[in-house]
Amino acid sequence: MTLKPAVRILVASIAVASAPAFAQNIAVVNGKGIPTARADAIVKQVVAQGQQKDSPELRELVKKDLVSREVLMQEAEKQGYAKSADVKQQMENARQALVVQAMVADYVKKNPVKDTDVKAEYDRFVKETGDKEYHVRHILVDTEAAANDIIAKLKGGAKFEDLAKQSKDTGSANNGGDLDWATPSAFPEVFSKAFVSLQKGQVTEKPVQTPNGFHVIKVDDVRQAKLPTLDEVKPQIEEALTQRKLQAYQEELVKKAKIQ
């Protein structure tokens, strides 16, 4: 069929007018368009996560997923699920989460953790951890008298590893009371204070009491601690300080709020 000039002009004008509308949608499902911007956002997120590279194949997969989702959504709405009280509540929860997430991301962007703060936190960590590691053994008993009896036997020549078999700490009892290498900060303060002044091979002169009972502690060896460098732990410190900032920000907002 040959179109008349006037008809051809009309069809062409309709096609030109419709082009921008179609370009804005990646697909149209039962008359409802799926915005191309939505597909672009998903592709961008997938690429940012390092899962795949932007490609025609990826975009086709995203398109199919969005079309399937739209078909299901239209059917769910037709069946009235969008009006369900439970669904509405979940949608509101999701809306709040997204809005708060956006605000938090903006707050973090505007209030970044400073390098000086990271360095100060790292220095505090090094100071609290100490520059030495201790290879420690212990024997845990219920009473101070039992602990004193063990100390007396050790002074009499008994082997620490043999006496450790009676320890309440079943995890180390069969291993000579061995607690392996660790920094003092890895133990309760009262426990670590008792052995940091000991030399290699020495045993505590008096029982050390903790909530678990009475300990007899021996230092097998001492060495320089192998602490991570600032560069190695900087990401973790930044994350911890960021969370601390967010916690303080949240608490400040709660204090200002009128809560009844």
Image (cartoon, grey):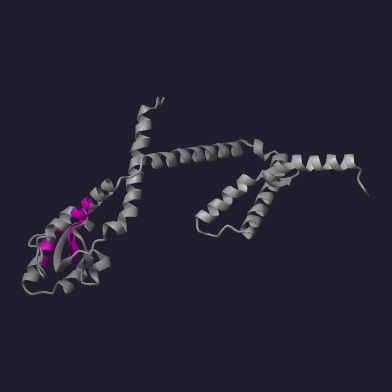
Q: Can see residue 188? A: no
- Magenta highlight on residue 153: no
x, y percent for residue 233 = 31, 56
Is residue 216 found left or right of 226 in the rendered image?
left
The boundaries of the magenta stretch are 123-150
Is residue 103 found left or right of 77 in the rendered image?
left
x, y percent for residue 113 = 33, 45
Q: Can see residue 22? A: yes
Q: Nearer the viewer, residue 137 or 213?
A: 137
Residue at horizontal 80 percent and vertical 40 percent from the top: 14
x, y percent for residue 23 = 69, 45
Q: Nearer the viewer, residue 48 or 215?
A: 48
Residue at horizontal 64 percent and vertical 60 percent from the top: 57
Q: Nearer the viewer, residue 234 or 253?
A: 234
Q: Nearer the viewer, residue 187 or 164?
A: 187
Q: Residue furthest right?
A: 1
Q: Is residue 29 above or below residue 142?
A: above
Q: Is residue 85 above or below residue 34?
A: above
